[in-house]
Amino acid sequence: MNRVLDIAGAAVAAAALAPVMAATAVFVGVTMGTPVLFRQERTGRHGEPFTFVKFRTMRPAATSGFDPGSDADRLTAAGRFLRSTSLDELPALWNVLRGDMSLIGPRPLPTAYLDRYTEREAHRHDVRPGITGLAQVLGRNNLTWEQKFAHDLHYVRHRTLRMDLRILVETVRTVVRRDGVTATGSATNHELRAAAAAGPSAAGPAVAGPAASAAVEDGWRA
């Protein structure tokens, strides 16, 4: 049922938003040139990699005169607008139709982070990643990584159709308010901790942490 709703929802959204996506593609091409789309290998269900696609918001890393490692240098004014309105995420509907992603689920992260999760945190990959999710409507990039993962794990353990529908409604509100677009002190988001920090001390069964407990208190349990 979840997959059927994903396909139906993504197909309807893609059809309805086709003019918006076409206009956004032209906007990116005019303001930043080609390529219009950004592609990156990210981690999907059961840890399988897939190619995530979105509209480009940054200058190429090799652009002369900019620090290739600095998101602040590479992020353009047009890119900031696309991120703040979440228009850059629209091509990910294609990932949903392909089966790489779901409409709702933990956000897909780069495959470079695979060795940085604790055993417990890795359970976020038990479900398909989503365009939006519980962590996105409960703080987005204002949250610490530990808080995001706690929300992800809570979703994996307690997800229901009712919860998914509520997340969709809250996502619209979050996008309209432009909440949590960037992390404090970062042009985008802070990098996940180094692999060495993901030691065995935090390993264990997928249980809800403090942030997820707060989510339960806020009425997010099924």
Image: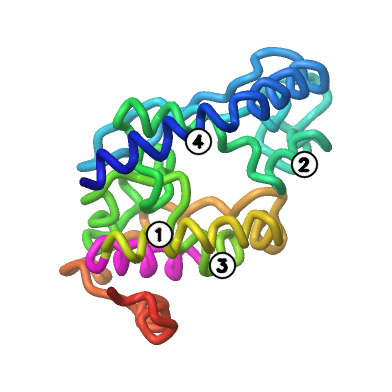
Which one is earlier in the sequence, the residue at label 2 or at label 3?
A: 2
Q: Residues within 10 Å of mark 3 (few under 14, many from 20)?
A: some
Say what amino acid the circle numbered 3 marks.
Gly
Of marks 4 and 2, the one in the foreground? 4
Instruction: Tell me residue 89's x, y (percent).
Output: 57, 37
Q: Which of 156 and 73 is in front in this view?
A: 156
User: Distance of mark 2 from mark 3, alpha carbons?
Assistant: 19 Å
Instruction: Tell me residue 215's x, y (percent).
Output: 41, 78
Say what amino acid the circle numbered 4 marks.
Ala
Which element is circle 2 on?
A: helix
* Residue 181, picture quadrant: bottom right
Query: Disc 2 marks which residue?
Result: 81
| Span shown in magenta | 144-158
Query: Disc 3 marks which residue?
Result: 139
Label of residue 165 in the image: 1
User: Distance of mark 4 from mark 2, alpha carbons?
Assistant: 21 Å
Which one is earlier in the sequence, the residue at label 4 or at label 2?
A: 4
Query: Disc 4 marks which residue?
Result: 13
* Residue 108, picture quadrant: top left
Q: Which of 165 and 115 is in front in this view?
A: 165
Of marks 3 and 1, the one in the foreground? 1
Q: Residues within 10 Å of mark 4 (few under 14, many from 20)?
A: few
Which element is circle 3 on?
A: loop
Which element is circle 4 on?
A: helix
Q: How crowded is mark 1: few (under 14 residues within 10 Å), some or many (20 or more)?
A: few
Whether 147 is among the magenta residues is: yes
User: Distance of mark 1 from mark 2, alpha carbons?
Assistant: 27 Å
Q: Is the magenta stretch mostly helix, strand or loop?
A: helix
Instruction: Tell me residue 201's x, y (percent).
Output: 25, 71
